[in-house]
Image: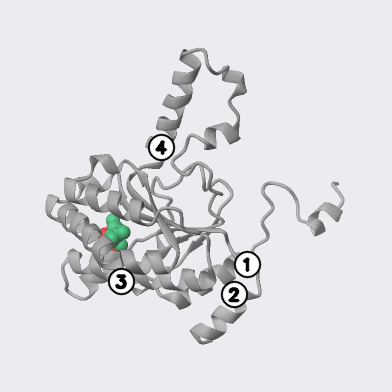
Amino acid sequence: MSAEELRSAVLLGPMPKHIAIIMDGNGRWAHARKLGRYQGHRAGVDALRRIMRAGARLEIPILTVYAFSTENWKRPQEEVRALMNLLVEYVDTDSEELLSQDISVNVIGHPEELPLAARQAVHQVCRRTRGRSRRLNVALNYGGRREIIDACRELAAAVHKGELAPEAISEEMFARHLYTAGQPDPDLLIRPSGEMRISNFLLWQLAYTELYVTPVLWPDFDAKHLYEAILAYQSRDRRYGGLSKGQAEDSLC
Ligand code: FPP
């Protein structure tokens, strides 16, 4: 099927409100072409641009992309620097397009620990794009375990001050202390490059998310791959731990 045919098919089904993506495989893509890892990350930014455009056409309300994890600091300094430079460049070249797509950029993680230029770029794009109807969450210096610990600390502090009873802590309250407070959990997680891991991404929020893993490397990922992922999502039976109608009619014994 052509991309347009796939897109038309996608429009017939329920549209995910929130899609999360682990942008993986940049290094392998570059290696296969005898290019430096930097070129792979640069091609990864092009893929992000394509997916933002396809997502905008489908009017997906929220896209969350994993751009830099708390573990990525372990990479060689040169690669970390290259990723930060790409982030600054992306803000510089793509802010206007994000505005024209009616997108607010929001950072989840700890951007205050990023190098100054990256921090400034992030601050600027978030401020410029505030209040738009759709959202791009960029996970930067993000770790799912750290996010949960941050939420625990906030709640523990409120308990310590006598402002909160421990038994009043509910799942809903906990979620309000996550970086994604006020946003629905992802309906769909896309992981390119074939790895079967969550990699410390949105650990709480992915509890009932549909997972879609594809061998396609992120720099090769395009609108067609996005439509295929959404079609797979639309074919799933989301039961949230309950039973589907057919199953509920089966006898227990
Ligand atoms: C994982 O691929 C990818 C990353 C650690 C960085 C993702 C970043 C980008 C796509 C570009 C920067 C983002 C923005 C928002 C400008 P990998 O290097 O681990 O690939 P490999 O597993 O094949 O080595």
Q: CA distance from mark 3 to mark 4?
A: 28 Å
For ligand 1, which image quadrant applies? Answer: bottom left
Distance (Cα) linking label 1 and label 4: 29 Å
Q: Earlier in the sequence, mark 1 or mark 2?
A: 2
Q: Which mark is residue 46?
A: 3
**Could you tell me which residue is drawn at 79 percent across and 55 percent down?**
247
Residues 93 and 38: in front is 93
Q: Three-letter amino acid code at disc 2?
A: Val
* Residue matched to label 1: 234
* Residue 222 appears left or right of 59: left
Q: CA distance from mark 2 to mark 3?
A: 23 Å
Say whether marks 1 and 2 touch (CB < 8 Å): yes
Secondary structure of the residue carrying numbered label 4: helix
Q: Is residue 150 left or right of residue 141?
A: right
Q: Of the numbered discs in the image, which one, if any, rests on residue 147?
A: 4
Q: Is ligand 1 within 8 Å of the beta carbon of the residue shown at mark 1?
A: no
Q: Position of residue 74 (x, y in %)?
A: 21, 45
The answer to which image quadrant residue 168 occupies is top right
Using the rendered view, name the quadrant where residue 83 is placed.
bottom left
Q: Work out whether 191 lies above or below 69.
A: below
Which residue lies under the disc numbered 2? Answer: 10
Q: What element does badge 2 sit on? A: helix
Whole-angstrom CA distance, mark 2 to mark 4, is 33 Å
Task: Tell me if mark 2 has few (under 14), some (14-19) or many (20+) residues whose alpha carbon lies within 10 angstroms of its own.
Answer: many
Amino acid, disc 4: Glu
Q: Secondary structure at mark 3?
A: helix
> Pointer 3 and pointer 4: residues touching (CB < 8 Å)?
no
